[in-house]
Image: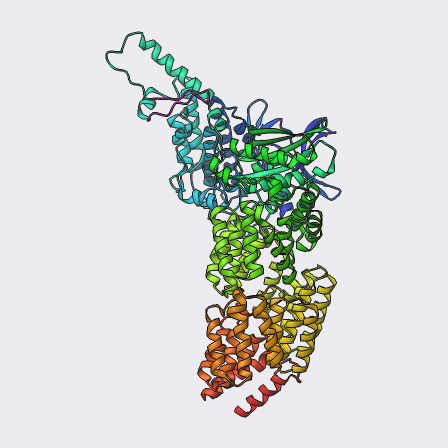
Amino acid sequence: MGVVYRAEDLTLHRFVALKFLPDHLSRDPQMLERFRREAQAASALNHPNICTIYAIGEENGQTYMAMELLEGEPLNHRIAAGQFEMETLLDLSIEIADALEAAHAEGIVHRDIKPANIFVTKRGHAKILDFGLAKVTRGKGKFASGGSAELGETLGASADHLTSPGIALGTVYYMSPEQVRAKELDARTDIFSFGVVLYEMATGTMPFRGESSGVITEAILNRTPPAPVRLNPAVPQKLEHIISRAMEKDINLRYQNVADMRAELKLLKRDSGSGRALITEEDLVARPSAPRSRENGSAAFSQPIITEAAWHPRWRFLLPLAVLLTISLAVGGLYWRSRAALKLTDKDTVVLADFENKTEDPIFDGTLREGLAVQLQQSPFLTLLPGPEVRRTLQMMGRPADVRITPEMGREICEREGLKAYISGKIAPMGSHYVLTLVAADGHSGAMLAHEQVEAANKEQVLGALSQAATQLRKQLGESLNSIEKYDTPVEQATTHSLEALQAYSAGYRTKDEKGDEAAVPFFERAVQLDPKFAMAYALLGTSYQNLGERGRGAELVGRAYELSEGVSEREKFYIDSYYFDLVTGDLDKARKVYEQWAQAYPREDKPVGNLGLLYGYLGQYESGLVETREALRLHPGSSLRYANLVQNYLRLDRLSDAKSAAKEAQLKKLDSPFLCFYLYQIAFLENEPSGMAQQVAWAAGKPGVEDILLAVEAGSAAYSGRLKKAREFAREATASARHAGENETAAGYEAEAALREALFGNPATALQRVEAALVLSTNARDVEFATALALALSGEVARAQTLADNLAKSFPQDTIVNFNYLPTIRAQLAVDHHDSSEAIEVLNIAAPFEFGQPGDASFMPSLYPVYVRGETYLAAHQGKEAAAEFEKILSHRGVVTNEPIGVLAHLGSARAYVLEGDTSKARAAYQDFLTLWKDADPDIPILIAAKSESARLQ
């Protein structure tokens, strides 16, 4: 939130701290107002334990705040370093309570009390900082006496709210239950947060922890943390009582004002200062025995047992001395115990810093970090903070997203994200040899947790040495030998023996994460050129092409990865196998099984769960897809793709309100993406908001690989309203944009979709032209062949349609979508062409389990076509009731069909079905619905001419 400089006041000749907003926040009115609010709140307080604000001003367009220069360190660093004695803990706690009492007396609620916002000066005094989230209340001073106050406007923001209603402010680990619920807050929220800080000071650990904000907030609301004495037997019973009451979840059972809490802290301090033991014999007898440990160098209490036979008068003097000695040993080791025994678990996430390259050879830049990432990621025990999460945190820190992650920065990321450890590496020359060093360090204190150093005789042996070092580091961090033996493929086997190829792969992986598939493709292509046996590079290159709509090319490359996957690691094997069955053979049942096995082996990885969500969407099982998608987002809350997938699932279930909320949440986190843009367009279309549609088209303009998709969607929307000429223009632009980006397969999809539209609207000649254009661009692509075959069948070109259908069956014999959606639809239409409705209905029965699915990709999603053809078949057979039921399926699944042409044609189909049923009233209404949607349609469209004629006959 701020950049702080040490500066000299040239008028008063004193040193001060100057705080500025970072450049990326200084133009944000909301952030600027919060900055001013911090100055206003803190400057209203004059207290020795609150950082003094001297002035706020503006210079050269930059707002700054001049404040007291403090020398020392934040409380969180002191906690991490384990430097507390009980006396110091009580002194600081009393000062913090005194400062909070002063703030509350002025009607100011801090709302973000945490160790990072409390400074400990060199003289050992506490100073509360950062009132950026403070709130002022009406009825100044009421909280000081324990009463409630009516909450008023936020400081400096009476005209405009600085926060949205229902948004929880603060740092999640230290939030009160009412803060988590985004309720109105009073001073008692600060008391809860102060209790959490006291807990951490006394035990060295936070009471509420978790891998995600959802887990943490659930713990705050519903779970009682371990008693402090269990984590540190030196905690006096009275202090434990104070902490427990401050952290009471029921706000009415908590301290009602901080003055009472301060008074109890002072009494505890007085008792210790007067020579009365902080931990009494009564405490010792009352508490159960704690285990004794020789590893951490500190004493532990056990229940004293003194029998009559053992008693001797000299014990009157020796026993108190022994108790005091035990207390001093325990208090002296207050934090050593909690930190020295720090071990990672399979629930922890770690930050991987960049490798420090001391060799001056650029071949190691980025390469060794990627190699180490591959080694660590194959471990189910270790989870690395994903790249998007790292970049998001860097942006919050005011750093560029592509900045090199140093160990110091890794520690800061851990602090911000509440992570336990970071791992860094270094390579240095030693004569003609190389020395590689890996270090795992505590994310709070920076203390070393594990260390491994290996030597490589030459450059060719560096990757092998890296694998050895990574294996040893995993052992030191606590991973079981069984796990290491099972998941320990050497990096050169899991990836490549070529440093140059691995460097290109590393650049591609990072670029794919940061800039998308289009930008990543050249790096992956370079990697497979340098090492034609690099399986994972082929896999990622293939999935990139798939995401760009080049399904045929993508399948070819993933197929090559599958052929080369024999020696890859278990994790890479899961990736390649699942994508092979999903994208190449199309056997979704096999793909599902591999995704499930992958998710079971690596329960904290989002890819298998997220892809399961997409797979269920292909089959029309959107509720199941939503469950998996939510879980994927929980595992990777900083992923723009996972947010887009969630929006997609809500959209398909016609839960537009939920879809918009999820999209807004993503945008607030600055997680925009092409997929999110696409789904936001569809939402705007369904809600008939042209401005919303235009906004997404504008966002995509000029972006290769994105612009063409939105142009194609615009073509669909124009056609949906009968503006076929406009649709043709958009389709031509989409095709040209895709071809310009080198995406011929995508361009073929746009031509095939245009062909299908023309055939459905009764323009067979134009449909045939578009079919030819599609087949010229396509290379045996599944979705293109389906659309062109169906367009031919609808246009009466039975022989050619049959040929394409046969080729589709031959080329994709295991494909679930082909066998249970595409082929039944084409064959049914061919049966209708042969006037055999009964055969058409029988063929379409095969598609029934999956007919609501959404196959294809963003460039072409032919949804519910089996349903549409079945409806048309019933019309041909003069079965009006059955036909109406099929068209109603389409009309009631608008979130799946969106702007597909059959979405509007279903109204016309319903009208014709009602005519067959003899229900003139419903028929007139359905014709009117269709004609209203086509009120601005081109007048020469054959199906419109027919509809007007049919409707007129009913009048």
In the picture, residue 666 is in which quadrant? bottom right
> As displayed, is residue 451 above or below residue 31?
above
Q: In this rendering, would 800 be left or right of 311?
A: right
Residue 293 forms part of the magenta stretch: yes
Q: Quadrant of the N terminus?
A: top right
Rendered residue at 54%/92% (across/down): 953
Rendered residue at 72%/32% (across/down): 359
> As displayed, is residue 73 above or below residue 109?
above
| Spot occupied by residue 25 in the image (x, y as percentages of width and height) | 66, 45
Residue nearest the observer in this picture, 231 or 614: 614
The residue range painted magenta reads 288-302
Residue 202 forms part of the magenta stretch: no
Residue nearest the observer in this picture, 869 or 923: 869
In the picture, residue 248 is in which quadrant? top left
Residue nearest the observer in this picture, 395 or 809: 809
For the question of whether residue 594 can be seen, the reply is yes
Number of numbered callouts drawn: 0
Q: In this rendering, would 538 be left or right of 105?
A: right
Q: Main SS of the magenta segment? A: loop
